[in-house]
């Protein structure tokens, strides 16, 4: 930031080095605000019954083929969020970004909604969700870390001399947080709605062609219709420290009316218990104990069952 005096002219010199991203430079100047917009927003929040606070990024800050410079929201948005939350507890923070962000104010927020980049119908869709016309039933396709230091690639990114090594190897996303025992702010697969779901009665059966079925009951125990995405993870008992503790191997989405319950069935084949052997260059299965985990996110497991894969006349067969 540079203080410029009225009536004087200044020469501006910009040094730019192209490193393989977008070959463009933006140069501009924003006129001073006629009023203190920050304080105006805080005052409006104090006087309001409810506050809908929309924050986020745009293509200037994150876009395809380009990495964000910071994990936090740009400008003074975090300060604005903290001030508004302090002024009015009945605030919904709408995060309109294309990727996870740092949320230092999360403990003070009663409601947070991640909208990604919703497009031209964003406003109408947002009203439908906030008023309860539509029950939000989405699940996070990625983990939201608490801080940038918790991410899998933090120690190796951005590399040196334009060489980036994927030192995390198999431990990407939720697999990293599991193995490193670092809790995510919001885990992979997480998502709340205006209703609640209960899981029960897990049954594991072996069917033809050495396939394994997982059957369980999901019940909408709330008062409104909603959709639940049930997730099935597989965990090998003797996985090494370089391997994931568990991996997602199946999921199902069901729309349930209030108090309705359905039996969900997920089928696992040999491929779902396999790992890639770099020596044989093929998918292999290790015999031993495998745990089947049914949950509503990578960190919220509701049902568990164990099966044994053993060699029978040279063929791996599941024994429940």
Image (cartoon, rainbow, N blue to C red):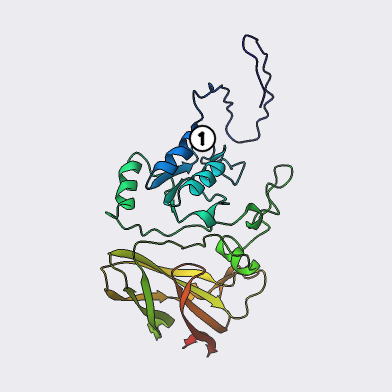
Residue 27, position as x, y percentages in the image: 58, 23
Q: Please state if 63 lies on the left or on the right of 138 as rendered.
A: right
Q: Nearer the viewer, residue 204 or 190?
A: 190
Looking at the image, can residue 98 be seen? no
Residue at the (31%, 47%) spot, across then down: 127
Q: Residue furthest right?
A: 160
User: Is residue 154 shown above or below 179?
Assistant: above
Q: Please state if 104 lies on the left or on the right of 207 as rendered.
A: right
Q: Which residue is mark 1?
A: 38
Element class at badge 1: helix
Residue 188, position as x, y percentages in the image: 50, 62
Looking at the image, can residue 102 be seen? yes
Asked where in the image residue 12 lies, by quadrant, the reply is top right
User: Is residue 299 shown above or below 155?
Assistant: below
Q: Please state if 161 lies on the left or on the right of 271 as rendered.
A: right
Q: Residue furthest bottom?
A: 313
Q: Residue furthest front?
A: 47
**Viewport quadrant of the N terminus:** top right
- Looking at the rendered structure, the number of numbered marks drawn on it comes to 1
Q: Nearer the viewer, residue 93 or 318?
A: 93
User: Is residue 250 shown above or below 238?
Assistant: above
Q: Residues within 10 Å of mark 1 (few under 14, many from 20)?
A: some
Residue at the (48%, 85%) spot, across then down: 318
User: Is residue 257 shown above or below 116?
Assistant: below
Residue 273, position as x, y percentages in the image: 51, 75
Residue 124, position as x, y percentages in the image: 30, 43
């Amino acid at each position: 930031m540079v203080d410029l005096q009225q009536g004087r002219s200044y020469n501006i010199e910009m040094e730019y080095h192209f490193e393989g991203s977008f070959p463009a430079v933006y140069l501009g100047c924003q006129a001073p605000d006629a009023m203190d917009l920050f304080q105006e927003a805080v005052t409006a929040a104090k006087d309001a019954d409810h506050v809908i606070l929309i924050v986020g990024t745009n293509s200037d800050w994150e876009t395809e083929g380009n990495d964000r410079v910071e994990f936090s929201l740009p400008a003074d948005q975090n300060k604005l969020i903290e001030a508004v939350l302090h002024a009015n507890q009945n605030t919904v923070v709408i995060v309109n970004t294309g990727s996870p962000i740092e949320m230092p104010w999360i403990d003070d927020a009663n409601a947070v909604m991640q909208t990604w980049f919703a497009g031209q119908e964003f406003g109408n869709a947002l009203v439908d969700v906030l008023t309860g016309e539509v029950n939000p039933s989405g699940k996070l396709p990625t983990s939201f870390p608490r801080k940038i230091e918790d991410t899998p690639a933090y120690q190796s990114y951005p590399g040196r001399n334009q060489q980036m090594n994927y030192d995390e190897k198999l431990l990407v996303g939720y697999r990293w947080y599991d193995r490193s025992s670092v809790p995510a702010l919001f885990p992979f697969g997480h998502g709340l709605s205006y209703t609640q779901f209960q899981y029960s009665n897990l049954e594991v059966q072996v069917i033809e062609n050495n396939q394994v079925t997982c059957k369980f009951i999901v019940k909408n125990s709330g008062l409104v219709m909603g959709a639940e995405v049930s997730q099935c993870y597989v965990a090998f008992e003797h996985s090494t420290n370089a391997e994931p503790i568990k991996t997602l191997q199946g999921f199902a989405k069901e729309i349930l009316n209030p108090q309705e319950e359905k039996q969900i069935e997920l089928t696992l084949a040999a491929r779902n218990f396999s790992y890639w052997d770099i020596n044989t260059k093929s998918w292999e299965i290790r015999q031993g104990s495998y745990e089947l985990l049914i949950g509503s996110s990578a960190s919220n497991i509701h049902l568990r069952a164990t099966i044994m894969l053993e060699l029978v006349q040279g063929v791996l067969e599941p024994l429940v």
